[in-house]
Amino acid sequence: MKKISRRDFIKLGWGAVQAAAASSMVTRAGLAARAGAASQPNVVMLICDAMSAKNLSLYGYPRKTTPNLEKLAERAFVYHNHYANGNYTTPGTSSLLTGLLPWTHRAVNNAATIKKSLSTHNIFNLLGSDYFKMAYTQNYWANYLLNQFAADIDDLLPFSDYGLINENVNNKFFKNDLAISHRAVEKMLYYGNSLLLSFLTDLYYRPRTTAEIKQEYPGGFPTSGIHHNVFTMEDLFDGLSAKILDLHELQRPFFSYFHIFPPHYPYNAHRDFYGMFDNDGYIATSKREHTLSAGVPESALDAQRNQYDAYLANLDMHIGLLMDKLEKQGVLQDTYFIITSDHGEMFERGTHGHTTAMLYEPVIKIPLMIFAPNHTTRQDFTAPTSSVDLLPTILKLAGQPISSDCEGNFLPGFGNEELSNRSVFIVEATQSSAFQPFTKATYSIIKDEYKLLYYHGYQHKYQDYFEFYDLREDPQELNNKYSQPKFAPLVSSLKEELLTAIEEANKKIGF
Amino acid sequence: MLIVNRFPKLRELTLVYAVNVVMLYTFSLWFSFEDMSRNWILYLAGGDIVGVLAYIIIGAFVESLLMIIFLTLSYSLIPPSIARGRFVLYGAILSFTFLLALMLRDGTYVGVDDFLKTTNMVFIFFAVSALILALAAEWKQPIRAFIESFADRCAVFLYIYMPLSLLAIIVVIFRNMGQNQ
């Protein structure tokens, strides 16, 4: 049996105190909610795509990127070590919506959907019929997932809603085959697989974005991956607040999932924010280029980081305004409001973005803030948590039974003590078949402050390679301590846990 | 005179249509097979891949119809004294150069902000290359014969692509008959 050190004991004790305090607050919040119009609380999820916790001043980033979130945090549950279970939209969002890890839901490839036999294991279905369920995403790949769950969603908005050009061929003509038609129409109209139709689409859409509005966005309009889906932050957030206020008028509890594209690339901030960090003297920690990197020079990474941070600040302002509005309208009195992301973003080691084999902190560490009804104090949690924890937590808040297949735990503060020794798993397997054990993948296990990375199937030494980091002492992940004798027992235990989990997952692949 | 009477003969229409079909279908299927081998095959079931391909084939079918309708109407508006007997030649040249220009645009596409630049490029390339080919065909009989025989050979592909289109239509109708999948 593992001995408990003095440090562990203190941590456990502090965790228990925090958990007790938090659960009493949740109880009070829950009671307040029940005292309101609805017996079950409303839940709003705001997913800000590609929002890395590493770039938020909320979590200590030197640039003031999120002053509003910092202010809002004073009355929120704030999670400091929250992780996405995947490094880009498809696996990250799938885990968030299903409470399953990527090696279980198998949505690991670009634009994939989850394993068909698990398609009912989603938050919308599991919330039951008491709730009115609404979903909206600007992200095309997340839209594939929502389409897969369409039968369980009462109000699934087209991805182009709140955009400058609000049209969607797919939802109009192929309602009964959304998942597949969506994939084909996307390829034909937006990715140029159809020569003439993509050209005509451009001809139709392009002149409709006016020059006046463009002046507001010197770097170009915010778009959501698909270049026709152009929007302004103002329209987007006006749309969100109007929708939430409408939902709040319903005579039944609602669950709404808003997956917005900012701060995902392209980082086109409003002119008030554009270039705000360009010459502020901030110098990021220089990190050696990784063998598996895309080879982006440091100067280019710095330039992209500047733009990303400005876009974050722009987004932060709108979140602040949205929350103010909801507060004034009384929505937050009976609504849990969750702000998180599907994955992070990376500007280091020769790589920009998140489509990478490297699962370093910037690409997987994401924010998580939860506002509970009438909760007025800040509560911080440092235990590692991940996206799969949201589904069971929301089900618990909604008073619904928790599926035994869920691979997440209740979040600390919501019916669970702060377990620092819970394991968090992250998987990247874009280039592997979903139907078989992954042949090319990166896995990560995080436990307490330790992190083990396992590269499998890549070139050179990364055929089967491990890295180990002590995140508390080395948050920048500069020193791989895998071979240090001091950590050998810990490394061995993490390795065994990870490899056993992979082996178990491989036994359950069957589609 | 009725505009219908100015329409090209069925054989002429078929040959020009065939040029469009070959270029549009081949382009769409080429890139779809690329997507399939790189991505879809990793996670989509066979039936779903067939479904995606069916939509894409219908897309190509719609494109080919748009092209032939546009060319036919344009031909009908040109005085017969100039256009008579030249539908296959000019239809094939216009189709070939226009679609080639679109391919060029597709290959150099950067983003919506470069739309005007790429669109201008399409039209310049199209106008210049169509003019050069048309002049060359008028000037040298072998060039004209080559273009017309090219269209003639393209007609063979109609025997592949048209049944495929019919099949695709059936697949899409079938997929859209049930409830949301």
Image: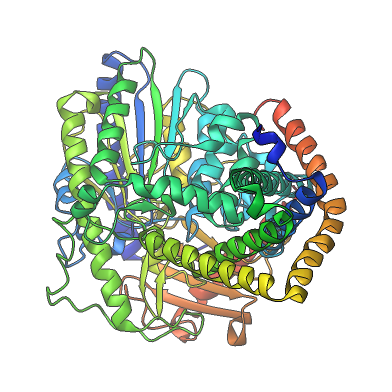
Residue sitting at 36 percent across and 55 percent down?
Answer: A383
In the image, residue A417 sits, relative to residue A479, either above or below, namely above
Viewer can see residue A429:
no
Q: Position of residue A431 (x, y in %)?
A: 63, 67
Residue sitting at 21 percent across and 30 percent down?
Answer: A326
Horizontal side of residue A498 vs B48, given as left or right: left
* Front-lying residue, A490 or A379: A379
Residue sitting at 48 percent across and 82 percent down?
Answer: A482
Colouring method of the image = rainbow
Dividing the picture into quadrants, the one containing residue A319 is top left
* Front-lying residue, A271 or B72: B72
Q: Position of residue B146 (x, y in %)?
A: 78, 71
In the image, residue A168 sits, relative to residue A306, either above or below, namely above
Horizontal side of residue A3 vs B17, given as left or right: left
Dividing the picture into quadrants, the one containing residue A284 is bottom left
In the image, residue A174 sits, relative to residue B20, either above or below, namely above
Q: Position of residue A21 (x, y in %)?
A: 25, 39
Dividing the picture into quadrants, the one containing residue A159 is top left
